[in-house]
Image (spheres, rainbow, N blue to C red):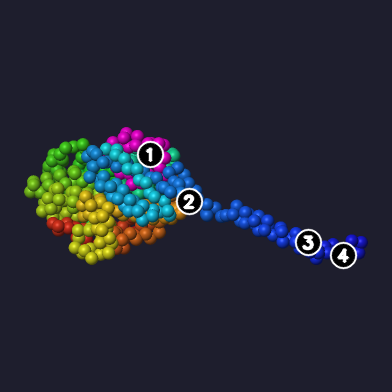
Amino acid sequence: MGSGSPLQRTPCTSPRCQSTDDENRPRFLALLATLCLSSRPAWAEKKYDPGASDTEIKIGQTLPYSGPISSYATIARTHLAYFEMINAEGGINGRKIRLLSLDDGFQPPKTVEQTRKLVEGDQVLFLFQSLGTPTVTAIQKYVNARKVPTLFIALGASRWGDYKGSPWTMGWIPTYHAEMGIFANYIMRNLPNAKVGVLFLNNDAGKDFLEGVQLGFGNLYKKFVVSEIAVEVTDPSIDSQIIAMKSSGADVVIDTLPPKAAAQTIRKVFDMGWRPTHFLSFISSSVATVLQPAGLDKSIGILSSGFQKDPSDPRWKDDPAVLEYLRFMKKHYPEADPSDGLNVDGYLTAQTMVQVLKQCGDDLTRENVMRQAANIKNLQLPMLLPGIKLNTSPTDYLPIEQMQMMRFDGAKWVFFGEVIGHE
């Protein structure tokens, strides 16, 4: 080192040295493999929260299988049938979907009880398509406090798009505000001298509809609306409310009532000999559960709005998506009426849920489920009307914001005009 030259190692060329290197090489390669495996990227790891495993994804919901709006339960039965089909095809990323669907009778205390059972007892990963504004509202704070995703709620109240106040709950259908805005705009353009009566349930959902009408007419609300008439969900008959609305001088009815009450309204209006222009919310536009019980002849001319294909409409008779839906119903839910729009709704929401679970991959944590639900990009489900797409983001919890006006011709809904709204 005294010469200042760098220290050099004389290579070992003896057979003994070479033999030692050869012996150590397998150990080195094994160590290298271990290091590579231990440093796998985080995205490659399986992550599970309660309700998820290598073989199963357990989810829950509450719906009114009994009570005054039990007709909606067919949505859940469609979910069960669809997930059964998916499971028979191998599941999602190799995991079977297990849906625990419980009856709450449209009673908020029962909804709270059943939801606690699902979350704390059954330990579901998340909740899916629970239904009923007063019932789901009763669990809203609970699921958000526990950070349990409550996805694609079968309600159109504006509160289900509140990504700041309720970041763990998300709607699916267009909002009641959006639909009422479409009706109000139609009336102002086409019926400038209309006298409007609004029928609504005396609960949070009904009041959300009413607020949508108020927002739709804006400063012209008092010019157009001559009566606001509330209906209790427990009312056995609404004849007195219909008579009062006619007496108010209304010649246009905006009917936002659920299926049973909507059917009663249609029948009573017709039987009275009253012929107002009748707008019916999409929540009660089912031919099978509303218009047929009311009387198809009594429903002619009713206006509504929609966002999904009607399997009974001849214009879709050769449509591949409708044919596939009809095959599914015949095989997996044969006792149901495939023309019932509620079953189409169940089919579409189940498909949306499958898409989110596919996006989750092997990260089946509640946080990632919510993240993926808020990351749907231009999803075109075949049973939606052409041009309607699902989009969400961390600041947009309203997957569907487009609709189209339609009129009942005595046998089917006939769409007219353009798709309204934005993607």
Q: Is residue 119 magenta?
A: yes
Label 3 and label 2: CA atoms lie apart by 49 Å
> What type is the residue that disc 2 sits on?
Asp
What kind of element bears circle 2?
Answer: strand
Residue at point 44%, 53% (across, down): 360
* Quadrant including the N terminus: bottom right
Residue 118's label in the rendered image is 1
The quadrant where residue 246 appears: top left
> Which residue was labeled with disc 2?
363
Q: Cα distance, mark 1 to mark 3?
A: 67 Å
**Residue 275 place in picture, x, y as percent:** 11, 51
Residues tagged 4 and 1 counted as in contact (Cβ below 8 A): no
Q: Which residues are magenta?
A: 106-133
Residue labelled with disc 3: 17
Residue 383, placed above or below residue 52: below
Q: Position of residue 273 (x, y in %)?
A: 7, 48
Q: Amino acid at mark 3?
A: Cys
Could you tell me the amino acid type at mark 4?
Answer: Ser
The alpha-carbon separation of the residues under discs 2 and 4 comes to 57 Å
Q: Nearer the viewer, residue 320 or 202?
A: 320
Q: Is residue 63 visible?
A: yes
